[in-house]
Image (spheres, rainbow, N blue to C red):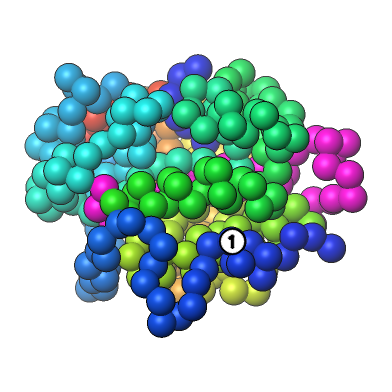
Amino acid sequence: MRRLPAALLALPLLLAACTQDADAEPTASAPAAEEPSEAAEAPRDWIYQLSGYEDGALDALAAAPHQVAVIDLARDGGEGYWTAEEVAALKDSGKTVYAYFTMGSIETYRPEYDAVAATDMVLNQWGDWPDEYFVKYWDERWWDLVMEPRLDRAMTAGFDGVYLDVPNAYEEIDLALAPGEDRESLARKMADQVRAVDVYVADRLDVLPQNSPELIEFDGYLDAIDGIGVEELFFLNADEPCTEDWCAENLEYVREIAAAGKLVLAVDYAAEEANVTEACARYAEEGFTGAVADVDLDAIYEPCP
């Protein structure tokens, strides 16, 4: 996860909070977006920028050559959201545009934080991110207060899809704060949430979680996603070769996702020229849409050649 500085409640219960009769109009105020078209091949490159937008606008991104852009749902990480006109202008540059937000945590600078903090849903702080806390993402109130409004906003603004970060919350939550849960149940509930997102947005948005590709082990998860974003397949932050066992495991899962015809947006954080070249070559070899960026994700970078 790289962003601005700084049983169980099963699927049927989640779906009850976010679905309606199949013949009814969607509850979201958003106009129906065009159904995503199926490309003959994967995009050649992508740009991942979550802050540092020049003059608080998307003009510089629109002028960049990348075919896919992932930007924060909000222009400032808070209440200043991109308008439909701004998103449309970015799309008119030929880009597919995804809205970034988290689904397993809440940052203190987000407008929903106070409402979430007034409940018992806020859990342990994420050590690497002092302004961020894991949450009870399986709680129906999380869906009502955060997920559904953000999905509605993404549809209203005309994004092509959502790029959902922190599915790995299931691995990081302090189990002492979630009585009765274990890693298996938390993983299942995260998979359920992604499936609920897919049901809610129907064909109006693509659904791309970031990381945790192992969740495809749960029934229905692979069908629910249109692709995956994945960090640090080949280099850890920064410029350190990814040689841990989990690196190879992640790669195998991502290959399985790609083989199912899903989009793979891979990003490594490297600056040394040899490492940038190697990462780009690996993306080409695997058939992934890749990027090599600075970990702060606050500037436009050159696409892989």
Q: Is residue 195 above or below residue 296?
A: below
How many numbered discs? 1
> Residue drawn at (45%, 47%), measured in percent from left and top?
149
> Is residue 60 visible in the rendered structure shown here?
yes
Report the magenta residues as a range: 157-184
> Residue drawn at (33%, 65%), measured in percent from left and top?
204
User: What type is the residue that disc 1 sits on?
Assistant: Ala
Q: Secondary structure at mark 1?
A: helix
Percent position of residue 261, x then y: 40, 73
Give the side of residue 43 with respect to residue 64, left or right: right
> Residue drawn at (50%, 72%), measured in percent from left and top?
20
Percent position of residue 162, x then y: 39, 52
Give the crowd class for mark 1: few <14, some 14-19, many >=20 residues within 10 Å: some
> Residue drawn at (24%, 29%), measured in percent from left and top?
300
Q: Is residue 127 above or below residue 291?
A: above
> Is residue 41 visible in the rendered structure shown here?
no
Residue 161 magenta-highlighted: yes
Residue 244 magenta-highlighted: no
Q: Is residue 115 above or below residue 144?
A: above
Give the side of residue 163 with respect to residue 191, left or right: left
Point out the residue furthest to the bottom here: 23
Percent position of residue 198, x then y: 48, 65
Which quarter shows the C terminus?
top left
Q: Which residue is mark 1?
A: 17
Which residue is nearer to you in this view: 206 or 84?
84
